[in-house]
Image (spheres, grey):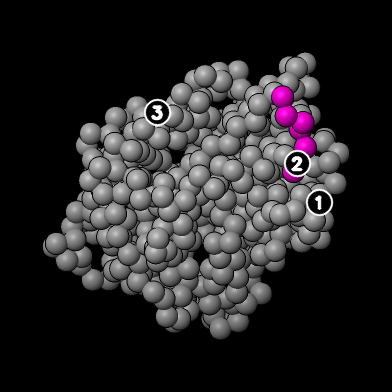
Amino acid sequence: MEHQEANKMGMQMEIISINKIKPAKPTAHHLKTHKVSLLDQLVEHAYVPLVLFYANDNFGKFKNNEHLDIRFLLKQSLSKTLVSFYPLAGKVKDDMQIECNDDGIHYVEVQIHCELSNFLSPKPNNRLIHNLLPFDPCSKELAKMDFVVMVQVNFFECGSIAIGIYSSHKIIDGHSILTFLKSWACESSSRKHVDPDFTTSPLIFIPSPKLPKELSLTMWPTLFGEQPKCVTRRFVFDASALATLRAKVQPSTRVMAVMGLIWKTAMVASNTISGFRKPSIFTFSMNLRPRHSPPLSPYSLGNIMWNTAASYDCDTDLEVRHVIARLRSAVEKVNDKFIEEIKGEGGVLKLEEKLRELKEKYYSNKNALYLGCTSLCNGGLYEVDFGWGRPIWSRPSSFDTGLPIATNYIALMDTKTSVGIEAWVSLEEHLMALFECDPELLAFSSLDPGPL
């Protein structure tokens, strides 16, 4: 943790403790090795950061020594939660398996000598928020870690709390981490939660050592080529703006409407800079659980997702409704037939075929504008209530790091009202200079409003 930098910027931090939180009961011997699924093989062991902020308004039951009581409650409930989430307390052994050795979750407690309102107002500093995580996103220490999950609990002087969490993408997609957080929160507040299912995905999407390693990178086209310096901006679409936008581009979900507007705006900026119309490819992650026949349980954990790709050529009029039609066409291809083809013993061959098709699409459009997108919308992020109320704000924390994965990338999240959308957009500097000024985009969104 870069506490020296935090001090220079006016935020003093003090480490209270560094522990490992182990499962309350030992993991059964027959579960000591968790084999990943074929879809997990497509994802590197890279940490995805998330930070949740809780105001001190609802800590009334912790009257005396409230931080001591909360510290005990969080650790005890996490230990109990890990009994059913046992792979998260293990170590990433290699590309094919997790060693479920009950070594525990890396767990840090920090006292921050300022109030949350000062920390987030008028606008939060991205670099300071990195200090709310166990390690800086760019640190050499983080690159050496083999924990599946790491947590840092930050206590502000006003009594507010921020929980920063790293989860390894090797076996955890966005849906999985929200399932874990909600389960931990339920355990903390004595509410019942459903046990996760780690076994279904590897049984359906059977892993194979024959899958070429280089093909897995095909899922992440923004990693190709040079990695220019990027700038990140946050655009907030409230309920009213989304209703107006959706009425304009019907039929469309709120997520697809925002993706379409952002993609269209980025293409306009790119074409303006180039002086001519360029092709573009937009990839976005899709949750396969509800698309499986019959639907998989929402408590099925792992990378049960697929990055589908939509393309836009130079000959089509650049309107949001046309862009959304391309997105919709890409979505329709990821159906139950597609899922059936990549299942079972022969699934790896069909998966290779799909990946080679994507690779050919990328390499045949070397001058295209590539954008990637992921969404945590509709996942219940603001339902993570540990017993003292829902988060007042949450945010990803991998942007403004210079990491390749954040190049020309968009992360969509619910607002705390769960009807709006926050779009974290990371673009090359010259693109962002035009993108953030686009009148159509700004007609439907606010640029980086304060979170409080």
Give the crowd class for mark 3: few <14, some 14-19, many >=20 residues within 10 Å. Answer: some
- Dot 3 falls on a residue whose secondary structure is helix
Find disc 2 in the rendering and name its residue: 320
The amino acid at mark 1 is: Lys
Q: In the picture provided, is 265 more to the left or to the right than 107? A: right
Q: Nearer the viewer, residue 415 or 53?
A: 415
Cα–Cα span, label 3 and label 1? 36 Å
Find disc 3 in the rendering and name its residue: 356
C-beta proximity under 8 Å, tags 3 and 2: no
Residue at point 62%, 77% (across, down): 58
User: Which stretch is magenta?
Assistant: 315-321
The amino acid at mark 2 is: Val
Picture layout, residue 86 above or below residue 231: below
Mark 3 and mark 2 lie on one chain; the one further toward the N terminus is 2
Q: Quadrant of residue 18?
A: bottom left
Residue at point 26%, 49% (across, down): 344
Residue at point 44%, 26% (across, down): 359
Q: In the picture provided, is 420 more to the left or to the right than 13? A: right
Picture layout, residue 422 above or below residue 46: below
- Dot 2 falls on a residue whose secondary structure is helix
Furthest residue toward left: 29
- Residue 248: mark: 1
The amino acid at mark 3 is: Arg
- Dot 1 falls on a residue whose secondary structure is helix
